[in-house]
Image (cartoon, helix red, strand yellow):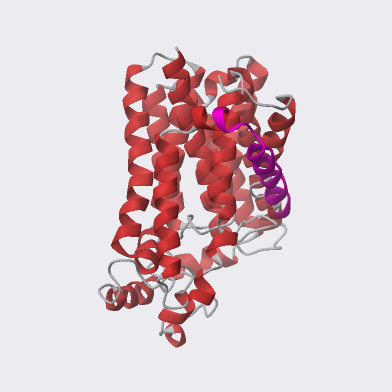
Amino acid sequence: MIQTRFDIRYPYFIMLAAVSSFLLSLVLLQLFLGLLVILWLTEKNSEKKKAFDRFGVLILIFLTVRILSVVFSEYPELSVELLYKDALFYLGFFAMNFYFKAFMDEQVRTTVLVFSIASSVVAVIGLVQFNLSIVERAQSFSSGYSTFSSYLLTGFAVTLSSRLLYQNKLNLIYWVIASSVILAGIVTSLGRVNIVIAAIIFLSVLIIKRYDIKSGLLIIILSAIISFISFQNNSVQISQRVEAPAYLSDRDILLNAAKELAFEKPLLGFGPRTFDKVFLYRDQLADKGVGSWHNDFIQVYIESGAVGLLAFILLIVFPLYYAFKRIFKTDKSPEKDLTIGSVIAIIALVISGLTAGFISSPVLAPLFAYLLVTISREDLVKREK
């Protein structure tokens, strides 16, 4: 395995703190991931080379294209923000990838369990705020309902898939409760697409993992009870959704604007973070605060052109292809469960990105890097065996 110059407990506890902070506190997430990056930067280059893999190559390709799109940006004063605002995604990936490969198997499993627990805590926070009518749609303290819902989709996938990590009866009870609470958090965030994705995650995991019907029913019933009580306490948004089920939330306007711009800068795009400059129909939006294209594929294409879009697609497709090959060749084990959970979580994040976005998010982009890392670690383990 990878050898670190530090006592392994230091990066291990920093990693636990980081995966606990994704939606609990953006400041703490940046602090802990930043500390992990600093430790990684001081590691021996010979050890860093051992951890560097095909996933790292894809990250570097995507980063290179994004930097090129900054250099040739129509609005360089805006695009240059990518160099520091997205740094935690790129550097965070390499730091997490290095230390994940230095951790023992039990430490990796604990990291995943902590992420699952943090997801359920975030869901509870959102549900409490929603039930107290502090917010109209469930969300966390540090983000809006869209980021909250997308984050919980990944937590739901990882938690559901990690049942083998809960060995005794008491832990299995927690597994049912945590899964139910996270699902209820997604439902009360009222993101229609994400609710459908959550249902697909649920059915996919039940089929792939061959869980007994009893466990599935318990999760559905408990989640339904929590959601029903929540909507009794706060029915403002659900009433509006029932009255206007076909409401498009401005996405039709965004899509039409993207079509008009599609062939103006097809190679490297207009540059990152230029939405406010190139989108000219803000007066038609119901929500005047919209700051992105609400679709990662459109966003990357408009910002970094066809080259950027291709690099982005490769960054998603190759890890999933690699993971699927390994899943079907591996016997039942906790490690296989972790891979399955991460794969389903990435797919959920990508699908939700069709109506929201994660690659430019200060929370969801590092989360995407974390999910890639959990898959990448198995590559080194397999080679060493």
Who is closer to the viewer here, 62 or 285?
62
Q: Position of residue 242 (x, y in %)?
A: 46, 65
- Asked if residue 183 can be seen in this view, the reply is no
Q: From the viewer's perspective, is 114 left or right of 345?
A: right
| Magenta segment boundaries in residue numbering | 27-46
The residue at the point 53 percent across, 23 percent down is: 163
When asked about the image quadrant of residue 111, the answer is: top right
Whether the magenta-drawn stretch holds residue 296 is answered as: no
Q: Position of residue 333 (x, y in %)?
A: 47, 15
Quadrant housing the N terminus: top right
Who is closer to the viewer here, 170 or 287?
287
- Asked if residue 9 can be seen in this view, the reply is yes
Who is closer to the viewer here, 35 or 40?
40
Picture layout, residue 99 above or below residue 189: above
Q: Which residue, as the protein is rendered here, is positioned at the far left?
A: 263
Q: Position of residue 162 (x, y in %)?
A: 53, 26
When asked about the image quadrant of residue 9, the answer is: top right
Quadrant housing the C terminus: top left
The residue at the point 53 percent across, 63 percent down is: 82
Picture layout, residue 145 above or below residue 217: below
The residue at the point 57 percent across, 46 percent down is: 91
The residue at the point 55 percent across, 50 percent down is: 89
